[in-house]
Image (tube, rainbow, N blue to C red):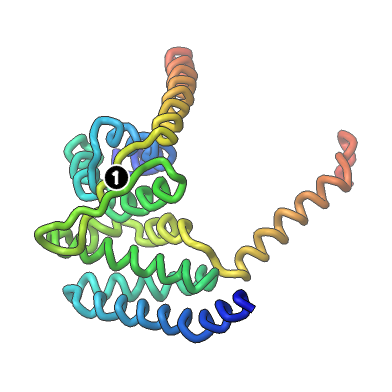
Amino acid sequence: MGKLVTEMLKGTLEGIVLAILSGRPAYGYEITTWLRDQGFSDIAEGTVYALLVRIEQRGFVDVEKVPSEKGPPRKVYSLNAAGQEYLEEFWRTWSFLAERLEQLHEGGR
Amino acid sequence: MAKGWTKALEKVYGPLEQKKRYRRYKARVEGLPASHRTAVEALQRYSYYFGGGTAEGGLAMLEDLADLFEQAAADGTPVREIVGEDPIEFAEAFLRNYPQGNWIIRERDRLTNAIARAEREGTPDEGTSR
């Protein structure tokens, strides 16, 4: 599974992270830990961090700096209206893709 | 006049402020555990290949890099778990978020323009592949 899932995740990780944030605000480490617990065990923390920097620059999240017991303040990300809108578009696109792939899958049997 | 002054002040304080930020960044890197410091220094070196967009962008990138590795060190996250199996992939995904060097922008423009020019040169008739 390892290599293939990494490749497939590339285009969808952004949507996955926005979906996580639509549930509740979170910081990078929490998001990475959650993904690992869900079976995406190869996911790099830096990859998630780079993605968070990008969605912040694109204006999909609001960021709050919260002091932490150890290390620098943690950036807590929460989904805003623009992010919510983008997430809806992501789900529409995902449904389209999933439907087409399912058709191919069934046709191949 | 006011604009001139601002420019003059920026000339004096801008670079100075940036130098201070860079020194602060270096100090943060010095404070990291050896493994994390080695990784940050290697990533910084790699960034020069793309970098040179703006001093501001470069500094923002280095500060974000320091944030990531400081926080990871505090959480006890080993370097491999930060960077992943393929450091190049991480580095490029990360660096894409910041202004990139003039040369790479120029070369990308050159490629885009060359393809547009090629497109204007027409569509070959079927079967004429000389």
Q: Is residue A35 above or below residue B68?
A: above
* B76 displayed left or right of B48: left
Q: Is residue A41 visible?
A: no
**Residue B118: x %, y % from top left:** 82, 50
* A21 displayed left or right of A95: left
Nearer to me, A7 or B19: B19
The N terminus of chain A: image quadrant: top left
The C terminus of chain A: image quadrant: top left
Residue farthest to the front?
B1
**Residue A96: x %, y % from top left:** 48, 20
**Residue A103: x %, y % from top left:** 47, 15
Residue A41, quarter of picture: top left
Residue B26, quarter of picture: bottom left
The residue identified by callout 1 is A77
Q: Is residue A34 visible?
A: yes
- Residue lying at 22% horizontally and 63% vertically, measured from the top left: B79
- Residue lying at 21% horizontally and 50% vertically, measured from the top left: A29
Q: Is residue B26 above or below residue A55?
A: below
- Residue lying at 34% horizontally and 68% vertically, measured from the top left: B63
The subunit letter for the residue under badge 1 reads A
At label 1, which amino acid type do we have?
Tyr
Nearer to me, B82 or A20: A20
* B34 displayed left or right of A92: left
Nearer to me, A3 or A15: A15
**Residue A100: x %, y % from top left:** 49, 19
Q: Element under label 1? A: strand
Other-residue count near label 1 (Cα within 10 Å), few / some / many at <14 / 14–19 / ≥20: many
